[in-house]
Image: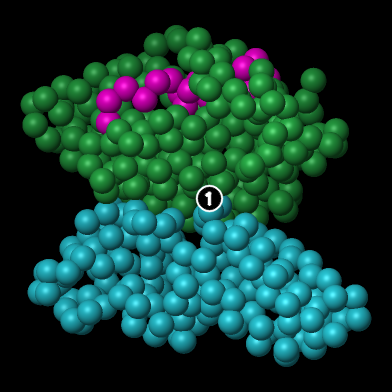
Amino acid sequence: MLTEAQAWEVLQQVPDPELPAVSVCELGIVREVHAGPDGVKVVVTPTYSGCPATEMIEIAIREALRDAGASSVTVETRLSPAWTSDWVSSEGRAKLQAHGIAPPHSTVNARTQPLRFAPPAPSCPRCGARTTTRLSEFGSTACKALYRCERCREPFEYFKPI
Amino acid sequence: MYTAHLEYVLRLADSALILGQRLSEWTGHAPVLEEELALANIALDLIGQSRLLLTHAGRLEAKGRDEDQLAFLRADHQYRNLTLVELPNGDFGRTVLRNFLFSVFQRPLWEALLSSRDTELAAIAEKSLKETRYHLRHNGEWVVRLGDGTEESHARMQSALDYLWPYTMEFFTEDAVDDEVAAAALGVAWPDLQPAWEAAVQRVLTEATLAIPGRTAFRSRGKLGGHSEHLGHLLAEMQHLQRAHPGAQW
């Protein structure tokens, strides 16, 4: 039987399938873990409605906990409160940055954002320059946008604030 | 006969699904790689929204139908999407203009649904609103860039607007479903969203130097199940696998 603390430790090691640098915990999608004699229940809040990784993540969570000795694992999806990039932990942000992905800005002002006005650009995760240009609002996955650094001229991905 | 509540959820679900399916037709054909990714991402968001909504609709219906059965085994007259979203994509300009007109509608709709008494619907709205903001900004920028662009891009955008505009009036046609759902505090009556929609649309179209067409008496009836000839063809492609091999799974 797994304790709650042990279950959390296992989940710390489960990587996001599309961002293997960060774990599902660091991404902030694991909301609650309940462990009891009947097994482990994990409450997950998905990132984007259409994120193809959502189902992979459920499978990965189930497998990791079973391998660690949980008798049964249930994964419950909770939509509200909706996931926000503000939930990405500080460890997660540091790992994204080290991985060449600019971590998300805070979303506090997103609600009042004008109809067509780009939010502040991220700094380059490689050279730290503040002069960067958005190439596309949408990147290789639902959660990232594509930018270019005007100093080192390298393209990079930005984890979108949402 | 569906209940008003179910009917309302299906209108939301089907509009998102059909536009998502239309946008996915761009995969492999977009003018540049960045827009290929953007269109596919927006399509994925919309299909994701429709999956949540169809699952919810299946529970409301209580006949044991899941999202797949509702998506793949209903005929065109059982679909409740707005006619606007089933129209062919046309060129890239018309595609982004339609996305814009629809996401300007989705935004106040999700905002209003945050306070729905249907807590599942409110949760879906909370999630979808974040995505819709991105769609709106992206497509709005393109509408301005192409409308206030070259002579050629401006002419194409104006002709796209003239083509799409009459179908937008369907958003705000009053009917009994809206009244019943609004009275029960389950959802907002769509005609109430018209002022917010018009103000936002006018601001962007003016900046795009496009002339807003006059109103006509034409009203499409997709949300009532009366569709254009285009939906059947779209469904034939989308549903082919499940129709040929019922219950097939990946």
Horizontal and vertical percent position of residue B55: 71, 43
The image shows residue A120, relative to residue B42, as above or below, that is below
**Scheme of colours in the image:** by chain
Chain of the residue on which disc 1 is drawn: A
Q: Is residue B210 visible?
A: yes
Q: B201 or B24: nearer the eye?
A: B24
At horizontal 29% and vertical 44% (from top left) the residue drawn is B35
Q: Which shade is chain B? A: green
Kindly identify which residue carries mark 1: A50
Locate the C terminus of chain A by quadrant: bottom left
Horizontal and vertical percent position of residue B202: 30, 35
Chain shown in cyan: A
Amino acid on which the number 1 mark rests in the picture: Gly
Of helix, strand and loop, which one carries label 1?
Answer: loop
At horizontal 28% and vertical 22% (from top left) the residue drawn is B160
Horizontal and vertical percent position of residue B89: 36, 25
At horizontal 34% and vertical 47% (from top left) the residue drawn is B37
- Point out the stretch of residues depicted in magenta: B76-92
Residue B101 in which image quadrant: top left
Residue B153 in which image quadrant: top left
Residue A130 in which image quadrant: bottom left
Taking the image as shown, residue A134 lies to the left or right of residue A144, namely: left
